[in-house]
Amino acid sequence: MRNFILGVLVTLLVLLFGGLAYALLGFIHTNADATPPRWESRFAMSAMDASMDHHAPRVSNPLPPTDENIIDGMKIYTMNCAVCHGTLDTKPSPLEHSFYPPPPQLILRPLDDPEWHIFYAIRTGVRYTGMPAWNKALGEQDIWKVTAFLSRLDKLSPAVQEYWKKSFGVAPPAPGEEHEHGHGHEDRD
Ligand code: HEC
């Protein structure tokens, strides 16, 4: 029994110091222009979803989804988010492959998460990724507006679609149009 415990302890120590040495001797890459391996995205995505499920309050959007609020959300998105998540002329962001993990292209592949989840992700950001916490840069109402916009991309009213077309020269993607290229997180579904 004593030898067994000793064996377990020695193994743990070897793993611990092996891991430390691997990191401190510079073997871990720092470049962000690489594609995370499938197992890593899958693991990170499940952990992120589980954490949001655990921490995010189940709040509902206090603002009604009027055309005016959705259009405000569109403007807030264009000014703050499009550079990473894709512009409203329906092109992927030029920075799509410049982050590790990559930013999901939210216009081309709309999210299907509930609003409380999206709101929490925007407000508090995502650690160890390029996703900032917006709670110090945007007011609560503006975060709700952009949340409303992002969660209704495939059911925009005709007036909002018209506004989009007029402002960006391209009609919003039809529901399902881009889905054959996979969801924002190809590995999740
Ligand atoms: C500097 C680049 C950058 C900017 C600017 C940015 N994001 Fe992100 N965002 C990211 C990255 C990278 C991720 C992926 C995080 C991950 O994989 O866990 C992300 C993730 C997200 C998610 C989570 C998606 C999910 O699957 O749950 C949402 C929602 C989101 N961003 C919305 C926004 C909104 C809204 C804005 C503007 C107010 C914004 N982002 C601005 C880089 C950015």
Image (cartoon, rainbow, N blue to C red):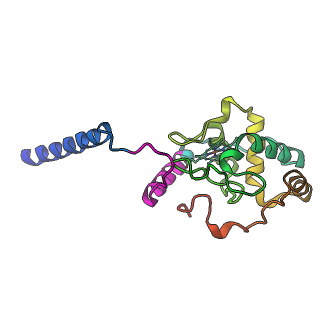
Quick check: 64 left or right of 6? right
The C terminus: image quadrant: bottom right
Q: Residue at x 86, y 56 (%)?
A: 169
Q: Quadrant of residue 92?
A: bottom right
Q: How many marks?
A: 0
Q: Residue at x 69, y 58 (%)?
A: 110
Asked if the magenta segment contains residue 142, the reply would be no
Q: Residue at x 70, y 30 (%)?
A: 137
Residue 147 visible in the shown view: yes
Q: Ligand 1 is found in which quarter of the picture?
A: top right
User: From this viewpoint, which residue is outermost toward the top?
Assistant: 136
User: From this viewpoint, which residue is outermost toward the bottom?
Assistant: 180
Q: Position of residue 46 (x, y in %)?
A: 50, 54
Asked if the magenta segment contains residue 38, the reply would be yes
Q: Quadrant of residue 145?
A: top right
Q: Residue at x 74, y 51 (%)?
A: 87
Q: Position of residue 49 (x, y in %)?
A: 54, 51
Quick check: 68 left or right of 59? right
Relative height, residue 158 to residue 76 (above, below): below
Q: Position of residue 4 (x, y in %)?
A: 11, 49
Q: Main secondary structure of the magenta part?
A: helix
Magenta-tinted stretch: 29-51
Relative height, residue 4 to residue 21 (above, below): below
Q: Nearer the viewer, residue 59 or 136?
A: 136
Residue 61 visible in the shown view: no
Q: Position of residue 68 (x, y in %)?
A: 89, 45
Quick check: 177 left or right of 28? right
